Amino acid sequence: MVTIFQDFSLDDATCASMFTDRKRLFVDLLDWDVPVLDGRFEIDAYDGPSATYLVATDEDGHHIGSMRLLPTEGPHILGDLFAGLCHDPVPRGACIFEITRLCLPTRLGAAQRLAVRNRLISAMVDHAHDHGIVAFTGVVSESFRSQVLAMGWRCAALGVPQPVAAQRLGAFRIDLDAGTRAALTLIGIYTPDTRRSPARQAA
């Protein structure tokens, strides 16, 4: 299942394992130049009370995938660091959130990572529906943006991909509507009732 909560505590085992897996993926494997706490946890300036975390766990409560949502009216990655990826002004608003830090541990294998990704997307769409979120933005690699654009929902590129460090990055916007869940269901992504209830609260 997927639990959704705001803020975090490293005293919480699920939170700690999420940040450990983020470090393994983004720092150890992908070689991102991002902060690491105590040599173990990938935690940046955007982690905290304003962030919403979607965390998938196995039957033993171990982290197997996660993503982070940031309000675009405050500090967020596209607006602060990559505004130049947008042809027009960066989308901002109380009902627009940024998708960041999609973490799918490589130890799971390709098939399980895909299944976890789909569960996270399903939970994200349901969370958006329940909280009045009408759009998501994000910054990803050029190749992954192609996948996001082809998922069946109303999604558009915000600009031409540009070289950043050793890769090409592009920005996107997803607009949610009454047909989003049906469109994602049609291509096998959306599954209802993926969220744990009641929502877990960070310690």
Image: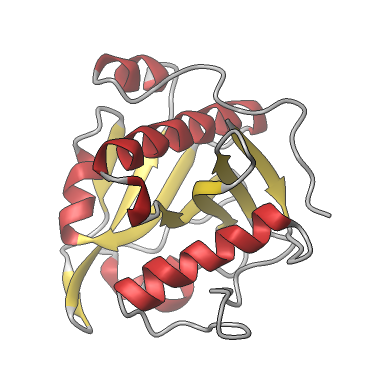
Q: Is residue 76 above or below residue 53?
A: below
Q: Is residue 162 left or right of residue 39?
A: left
Q: Residue at x 57, y 40 (%)?
A: 57
Which corner quadrant of the image does residue 155 belong to?
top left
Q: How many marks?
A: 0
The x and y percentages for residue 33 are: 39, 85
Q: Is residue 4 left or right of residue 56?
A: right
Q: Residue at x 72, y 25 (%)?
A: 197
Q: Nearer the viewer, residue 109 or 187?
A: 109
The scheme the figure's colours follow is secondary structure
Q: Residue at x 73, y 66 (%)?
A: 10
The x and y percentages for residue 116 are: 41, 37
Q: Quadrant of the N terminus?
A: top right
The x and y percentages for residue 16 are: 65, 63
Which corner quadrant of the image does residue 133 belong to?
top right
Q: Is residue 53 left or right of residue 157?
A: right
Query: For the view shown, which residue lies furthest in the front direction?
Result: 60
The reply to whether residue 73 is in sight is no
Q: Is residue 47 above or below residue 127?
A: below
Q: Quadrant of the C terminus?
A: bottom right
The reply to whether residue 44 is in sight is yes
Q: Is residue 151 above or below residue 21?
A: above
Q: Is residue 16 above or below residue 195?
A: below
